Image: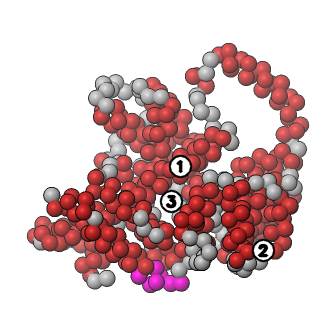
Amino acid sequence: MLKADLPMQQDRALRAMYRQHFEVVQSFVHKNQGNDQDAEDIFQDGLVVIYNNIREDDFLLQSSLKTYVYSICRNIWLNRLRKLSREVEVTDEHENIEIPDDQMKAIVKGERSEIIVQLIQKMGTECRQILQFFYFERLRMKRISELMGISSEQVAKNKKSRCMKKLRTMAEEDTVFKDFFSR
Amino acid sequence: MDNRDLQIEKYLLGRLTGQDLAAFQKKQEQDPAFAKLVKEEQTLVDGIRDYSNQQLKNRIGNLRQQMLEENKVKYLPLYRRSWVRIAIAASVVLLVSVIGWQLYLSPSSLGEKYFSDNFYPVYNVPLALRDSKIISVDEIEIIKENFLKHKFDEVIPDMLRYRHAFPDNQYARLILIISYIGEDRLAEAKAEFKMIDPPGELTDAVNWYRAMLYLKEGKLDEAAASLELVIADRGSDFREVAKELYQEIENNR
């Protein structure tokens, strides 16, 4: 249900994830030097990672959902502890699995991309929405045209291309962004 | 869009595989201008995804806040609470549960429970209002923010203004109805229900929210009847949740 493209269905799925899996993550964070706020933050980052991963065409869940959620959140928390140079002697209460690095990329942000984020915030609602639907939700153009009430798939495609071109132009005109690319 | 751009787009979406992917990677190695172009496009797409992730995290944070306010989840696990508190809480729960059991089984409290479990504002306001000539994009963003955060008292005046200018816009009317229900202004919601004339794609949503109104009023039979209409609509996005809710109502009747 988390893979659904309607906000209501997604919200129900996110709520269900909280109800079903938060406690085990909270308990893990508590037992490994963290507090309630850390647990909330880690769990929310974990949900973001999972939301991204299940949208990959080749994603295949190879454990129970509970183990997957726990393992993702466990990774995020241990990485955060390591960044703080804290010694980590892990106490686990639940089975965990190895998570490949490419499944953790949703929380790794580059400086260049941060500049693009600021440019996107300056774009109009429709452009932001169509680019998000296409590149983040990975929806097909036909579905995007239905969701946005656009008359046809071709019109949606053209809109998307125009928005992408606009973003590209904004990036090319941004001096900070140009500096990054000339390095 | 030419073939080169199409290939880049497929690559960025992770949809290039096998020989196509190998050829693409080889071209990147051999053609610096092409590699630069791919890198730039990748940066733009990474930015779109990071922006979306920030939005998603904010949305999850808001949902969590709503859940905490609804007391649906306990914030601290039991073992972190003091035994004294647990003992006091247990005594109170025992006392209240004896008195409250009969109340709990009443249609009005059951309706309230089902309502609070299932009532969410779902309509994407900016999409419904995007053709507006009287509300700016910034205002639409504010309405959307308020709507999704259940600040219906702030949505209602804006939607009344919009509906006044565009009386035929049924999306606006539905948003107004949802906001009235959220604010417990049921008489006004009912009046709007009488006037709504939903196009085909909105019929199921109207029936779903009509069920929400009946639940709020404790009218379980009427709510179930509205849910049946949603369930009968095979193309409805509300169908699965309507089935679950209908079953729950049936089980407790």
- The chain carrying label 2 is B
Q: Quadrant of residue B10?
A: bottom left
Residue drawn where x is 30% and y is 47% of the image: A101
Q: What SS does tag 2 mark?
A: loop
Report the disc number at residue B60.
Answer: 1
In front: label 3 or label 2 = 2
| Chain of the residue on which disc 3 is drawn | A
Q: Are marks 3 and 2 on the same chain?
A: no
Q: How many marks?
A: 3
For the residue marked with disc 1, what is the amino acid?
Ile
Give how far apart the Cα atoms at labels 1 and 2 are.
32 Å
Position in image of residue A106 (x %, y %):
37, 52
C-alpha gap between disc 3 and disc 1: 15 Å
Q: How is the image coloured?
A: secondary structure
Q: Residue at x 61, y 25 (%)?
A: B78
Alpha carbon distance from label 3 to label 2: 31 Å
Who is closer to the viewer here, A148 or B244?
A148
The residue lying at 41 percent from left, 57 percent from top is: B51
Disc 1 is attached to a residue of which chain? B
Decide: few, some or many residues near mark 1? Use Cα within 10 Å; few <14, some 14-19, many ≥20. Answer: many
* Res B82 visible: yes
Can you identify the residue that label 2 sits on?
Answer: B196
Give the residues in magenta. Answer: A151-158
Q: Amino acid at mark 2?
A: Ile
Front: mark 3 or 1: 1
Residue B197 position, x and y percent, is 77, 77
Lower position in the chain sequence, tag 1 or tag 2 = 1
* Residue pointed to by mark 3: A3
User: Which amino acid type is shown beneath numbered disc 3?
Assistant: Lys
